[in-house]
Amino acid sequence: MRSIGPGIITAALVFGPGSLTITSKLGAMFGYQLLWVIVLAVFFMVLFTEMSARVGMVTQASLLTLLQQKWGRAVAIVLGICIFLITASFQAGNTIGASLAFAELFHTPVKPWVLFFTGLAIFLLFFRSFYYLLEKIMIILVGLMLVSFFITLLLAKPKLLPLLQGLWPEIPPGAEMLSIALIASSFSIVGAFYQSYLVREKGWRADSLQQGKRESITGIMILGLISSFILINAAAVLHPKGIQVNSATDMGLALEPLYGSTATILFMLGLFAASFSSLIGNATIGGSLLSDAFSLGNQLELKAVRGMIMLVMAIGAGIAWQFGRLPLELIILAQAITIVIAPLIGIALLVIANDTSVMGRWRNSLWKNIGGGLGLLLLIFLAFQHLRTLIMD
């Protein structure tokens, strides 16, 4: 338990309401057939998260500082601003997800919960050791997700043979774009990139290398488990009855007539955990990296970093209050930035992880470079698909 931390935080901030919605929708529409997509996404996420954690533990400087030294300050600033804009764009979805879960549970309006949960998240920033508080909160929320979705899975009683068949790679007609969205939501290169900062916050250095790598892998495997539980739940409960879902709350509400209010309550608690953990974690990434990009520091205890984190939270709350949803224009903006930024981050991680002057004997092995190269090709493919979608729309 003492070694748990950075990987769990990454898992919690990557798996948000958007991931939950996409996974539920895929399970409802195509049953178990796309379970293998989660395995693929988790494989590459593990690879790049471990790479990032190793860089963070071995080097004396942050990743953006290393990139600044290698390619100039302009590159670090552009990356920091782009990541900030991506996190700010998606923050409203996290805020709305947490608020909707409680609004549905208590049959109340959404807006008071928007203020409450944003205020609570900002309040937590004022604790002296924010990282360790963040770690404990994320462990609790990930535990809540695991328990909630696993009990729901037991209630759903999935069929074993179709579930195992879902591990065989095939894409049914009409599932192409949703499969791409599922990979993009689970294989978060920005989340992997931030792992190097989290291990430094934890205080791990080269002498903790094996522990840090093991914990990072464990955290991402838990991310894969949570995603799998959701898809299996939707495949077992909704797919046979032809029930479609367009949001995570649809999935939770669809359980009540089939399994009673307890199942819905459990699912909504899982939705809250996914949303609130991303609300905090997403803002932490955007604020920390923007501050680091402008050489204001990256430690969570610094006032500049906390100020930037609060800015992301405030933007998310403002959009959620005004629109009550994540506006299409912001989704397009985030996708447009991701088209450029995701492959660049993948390239940056691979370059630094292979730089002998920086990594020494801990540089990438041949097999990690082969896997990293395949992961980079996948990021470029995802970016191309995003671009094609934007052009077609």
Image (tube, rainbow, N blue to C red):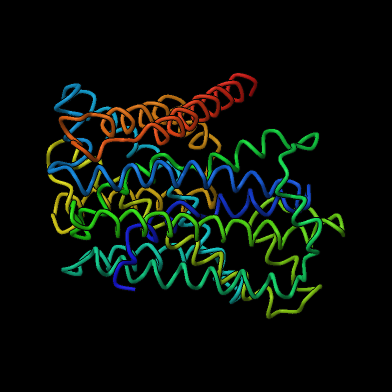
| Picture coordinates of residue 300, whole percent (x, y) | 20, 56
Quarter the C terminus occupies: top right
Residue 97's place in the image compared with 328, above or below, is: below
Residue at 54% across, 29% down: 382
Farthest residue in the right direction?
A: 241
Which of 357 and 239 lies nearest the eye of the viewer? 357
Residue 208, x across and y down, in percent: 22, 58
Residue 271, horizontal then vertical, whole percent: 56, 64
Q: Which of 277 and 40 is in front in this view?
A: 40
Q: Is residue 46 above or below residue 257?
A: above
Instruction: Examine the image and state in which quarter residue 291 appears.
Output: top left
Relative to 376, does residue 143 appear above or below in the rendering?
below
Q: Which of 105 and 31 is in front in this view?
A: 31
Choose top left, top right, bottom left or bottom right for residue 276. bottom left
Q: Position of residue 9 (x, y in %)?
A: 37, 59
314 horizontally vs 182: left or right: left
Picture quadrant where residue 207 is located: bottom left
- Picture residue at 60% right of the left edge, 21% below the top: 388
The answer to whether residue 173 is left or right of residue 198 is right
Q: Residue at x 31, y 29 (%)?
A: 348
Q: Residue at x 32, y 35 (%)?
A: 364
Q: How many labels does the image show?
A: 0
Q: Which corner quadrant holds the N terminus?
A: bottom left
